[in-house]
């Protein structure tokens, strides 16, 4: 659509394009709250996985904001971005319903020793997530599953998972799929640090609303309270704490 037609369709400013990764995650709720704060602006959602890919899209001007693990970005990329801590998300394991570990109410990390778990290894879009999984699993002898075809959409993801028969590392709130169960990981409880990320120096009322919505929801629902017994890499913890005051 030509730029003039786009602006005519949406008002005096372009839509703010926000990647929320997957349906059902916190990004959707934050965008919904932000839309109520600036009803005169259009905030559009995109569903793609991986902050590594989203960060490149932000720097290229094809995306305005995204969510994910800021500490996992390359230093040269992170230096050109700004971030606001949003939430510590407990990690879960998505298992085939008949997997030997599916009968547990929660899966201790030690119980995964020798098992393969899929965490996006080989997917260049999700390198920050694979790095987090590798750090989590290394002390417990858990293996990263080999690369799998990039599955776009719930149906394709479920099909590939059923074919591979491999547990998948995810976060609480990850969409449920037919034939699978989701079990929390424990002993310790691993956390995925989620930040709102945008291009350094970018200022826009819709982006301000997105930041305010993230701040308010985090405060209302205690998203940034980290349990003492939880697991989080030191680098991630320092970034989340040092930037926690960086809010509108």
Image (cartoon, rainbow, N blue to C red):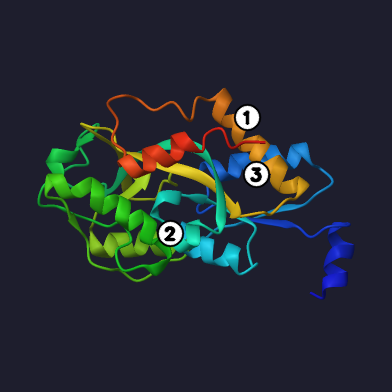
Q: Quadrant of the C terminus?
A: top right
Q: Position of residue 8 (x, y in %)?
A: 89, 64
Instruction: Tell me: residue 152, above or below residue 16.
Output: below
Task: Compare residues 219 and 198 and report the one nearer the observer.
Answer: 198
The residue carrying mark 2 is 75
Left or right: 65, with 102 as reference point: right
Are the residues flagged by discs 3 and 1 in contact, CB closer than 8 Å? Answer: no
Residue density around tag 2, few if under 14, some if 14–19, many if 20 or more, within 10 Å: few
Q: Quadrant of residue 162?
A: bottom left
Task: Determine if residue 182 is in view.
Answer: no
Residue density around tag 1, few if under 14, some if 14–19, many if 20 or more, within 10 Å: some
Give the mark nearer the N terminus: 1 vs 2: 2
Q: Position of residue 98 (x, y in %)?
A: 21, 47
Query: Residue at horizontal 75%, vertical 37%?
Result: 36
Left or right: 86, with 65 as reference point: left
The residue carrying mark 1 is 216
Query: Residue at horizontal 28%, vertical 33%?
Result: 189
**Res. 31 mark:** 3
Are the residues flagged by discs 1 and 2 in contact, CB closer than 8 Å? Answer: no
């Amino acid at each position: 659509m030509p730029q003039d037609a786009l602006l005519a369709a949406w008002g005096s400013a372009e839509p703010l394009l926000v990647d929320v990764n997957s349906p059902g995650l916190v990004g959707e709720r934050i965008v919904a709250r932000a839309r109520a704060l600036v009803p005169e602006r259009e905030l559009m959602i995109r569903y793609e996985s991986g902050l590594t890919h989203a960060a490149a899209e932000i720097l290229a001007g094809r995306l305005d904001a995204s969510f994910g693990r800021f500490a996992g970005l390359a230093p040269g990329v992170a230096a050109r971005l700004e971030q606001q801590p949003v939430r510590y998300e407990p990690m879960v394991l998505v298992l085939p319903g008949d997997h030997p570990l599916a009968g547990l109410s929660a899966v201790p990390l030690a119980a995964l020793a020798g098992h393969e778990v899929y965490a996006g290894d080989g997917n260049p879009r999700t390198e920050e997530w694979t790095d987090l999984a590798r750090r989590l699993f290394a002390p417990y002898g858990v293996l990263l599953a080999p690369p799998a075809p990039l599955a776009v959409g719930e149906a394709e993801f479920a099909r590939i998972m059923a074919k591979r028969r491999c547990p998948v590392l995810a976060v609480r709130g990850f969409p449920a799929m037919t034939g699978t169960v989701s079990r929390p990981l424990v002993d310790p409880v691993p956390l995925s640090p989620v930040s709102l990320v945008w291009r350094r120096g970018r200022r826009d009322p819709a982006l301000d609303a997105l930041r305010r919505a993230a701040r308010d929801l985090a405060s209302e629902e205690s998203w940034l309270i980290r349990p003492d017994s939880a697991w989080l890499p030191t680098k991630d913890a320092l970034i989340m704490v040092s930037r926690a005051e960086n809010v509108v």
